[in-house]
Amino acid sequence: LPKRILCLPMHPYLSEADQDRIIETIRNYIGSNSAQAAAE
């Protein structure tokens, strides 16, 4: 079993603004975790 699960909001009525916000949030999360991993 995985230690973490990523659940993304997905449905046909997801607005483009919501999609952009989701993408930005994921990119920020990945970027901050990459910096933390590099520092360790």
Image (cartoon, rainbow, N blue to C red):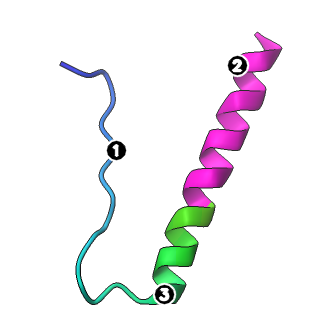
Q: Relative to 33, is 10 above or below?
A: below
State the residue at coordinates (53%, 87%).
17
Q: Earlier in the sequence, mark 3 or mark 1?
A: 1
Give the residues in magenta.
25-40
Callout 3 touching callout 1 (CB < 8 Å): no
- Element type at marker 3? helix
The kind of secondary structure element at disc 1 is loop
Q: Residue furthest right?
A: 39
Dominant secondary structure of the residues highlighted in magenta in the image:
helix
Counting residues from the N terminus, which is met first, the one under dot 3 or under dot 2?
3
Q: CA distance from mark 2 to mark 1?
A: 19 Å
Q: CA distance from mark 3 to mark 2?
A: 31 Å
The x, y position of residue 35, in whole percent, is 78, 29
Q: Can you identify the residue that label 3 sits on?
A: 16
Determine the residue positioned at 55% across, 53% down: 26
Q: Which residue is mark 1?
A: 6
Name the quadrant containing residue 23: bottom right
Q: Which residue is mark 2?
A: 37
Q: Give neighbour class at mark 3: few <14, some 14-19, many 20+ (Cα, 10 Å).
A: few
Q: On the image, which quarter does residue 33 sit in?
A: top right
Residue 1, placed above or below residue 4: above
Q: Quadrant of the C terminus?
A: top right
Q: Earlier in the sequence, mark 2 or mark 1?
A: 1
Question: Residue flagged by tag 3: what amino acid is it?
Answer: Glu
| Circle 2 SS class | helix
**Residue 36 painted magenta:** yes
User: CB under 8 Å between callouts 3 and 2?
Assistant: no
Real-space Cα separation, disc 3 to disc 1, in angstroms: 20 Å
Structural crowding at the residue carrying mark 1, measured as other residues with C-alpha within 10 Å and reported as few (<14), some (14–19) or many (≥20) = few
Badge 1 amino acid = Leu
Relative to 19, does residue 24 appear above or below in the rendering?
A: above
Find residue 29 and report its horizontal and vertical position in percent.
Answer: 61, 46
